[in-house]
Image: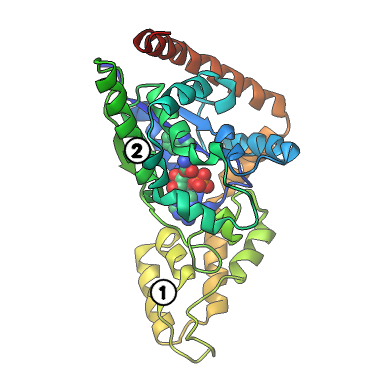
Amino acid sequence: MSQKRLVSGIQPTGKMHLGNYLGAVSNWVHLQDEYESYFLVVDLHSLTTVYEDPERLRQDKLDLAIDILAAGVDPAKCALFHQSDVPEHSELHLYLSMITPLQWLMRVPTYKGKIEEIKGKDLDTYGFLGYPVLMAADILLYKAQVVPVGQDQLPHLELAREIARRFNSLYKKPVFPMIEEKLTQYPVLPGLDGRKMSKSYQNTIPVSATPDEMQKLVMSMLTDPNRKRRTDPGNPYICPVFAYHKIYNSPTRQEEVSVGCQTAEIGCVDCKKECASLLIDSLGSFRARRAELMKDTSQVSAILTKGAEKARNITTQTIREVKQQIGL
Ligand code: AMP
Ligand code: TRP
């Protein structure tokens, strides 16, 4: 039986952090066995917000590909590539932009949200408004049925469905199938300050941090603000450190940590030390694979080139069909 087709992407803006790793990439590692998978490092999407720093983009897009491979995404099981190496993404984006009403784009919640969030940058651009059209192109180009994403991406998927519906109805042919979302297991991982871990908040733990750096970052994490003294009882359920215990610690130990916090038997420093050591251990094989890949990055480039070739087997066909439908 043929496998369902799956597409997902991640932006190369800064180092991959634990939120991306747990929220997206570790999920890809499981999905690649079950689906015909296309994983994109969406460098064109990065240009919608970071367009003035070519050197940084060059570095970030390679770093991210290395992190994804180190996380266990296996090029023998899927296609991993840079979005810009498959020019059909840009081409379909253009065709879809012709039929996407401006109103649809202006009401996407992430549009206004991101403008508020990313201060000090001119985001009043054509490309930034079109971000979700480019994402729709990423998905529709592969006629993908399954798209694993975090909660924050659901409005974009909804828009991709609307664009697909409009295309199919305008050109009277069901060219694009309907898309299923696949929500990831950890919808929101907190960052060092307790807000959502995000590059824009500078509250991240990069997965490629050394054990020492990771230890320092965990020790700097915010805890229950009402627990001012060692003897004050704490509330683990509002503490970001406990959120990590819930992911990395055994159920028995989680219970002990929770009770210990609420009775002030365990102090925040010890609690964080335990958390850091769990985190560092869990990423041991990631660090080993990453070090191996760093020895010869030309092999990583070769993997990405092959991934793009595999993708183009499909994307060139879709573009042929789309051009036929729209009269080009
Ligand atoms: P981005 O960094 O916005 O390109 O996000 C890449 C992927 O990681 C998306 O699927 C996000 O939903 C997911 N993601 C980003 N930050 C977090 C977080 N703090 N917790 C869980 N998932 C996240
Ligand atoms: N917008 C997504 C994010 O920020 C990344 C993305 C781009 C994507 N194209 C995609 C995700 C296609 C899934 C499918 O997380």
Q: Considering depth in this image, is 129 or 261 the residue closer to the camera?
A: 129
Q: Position of residue 260 (x, y in %)?
A: 42, 81
Q: Residue 212 occupies which quadrant of the picture?
A: bottom right
| Quadrant position of the N terminus in the picture | top left
| Quadrant position of the C terminus in the picture | top left
Q: CA distance from mark 2 to mark 1?
A: 34 Å
Q: Considering depth in this image, is 117 or 225 the residue closer to the camera?
A: 117
Q: Position of residue 5 (x, y in %)?
A: 35, 24
- Sequence-earlier tag: 2 or 1: 2
Residue at mark 1: 238
Which amino acid, mark 1?
Ile
Q: Which residue is found at the position 66% from the left and 66% from the top?
A: 216
Q: Secondary structure at mark 1?
A: helix
Q: Which residue is found at the position 28% from the left and 20% from the top?
A: 170
In the rendered image, the vertical position of residue 128 relative to residue 276, given as above or below: above
Q: Is residue 295 left or right of residue 27?
A: right
Residue at mark 2: 159
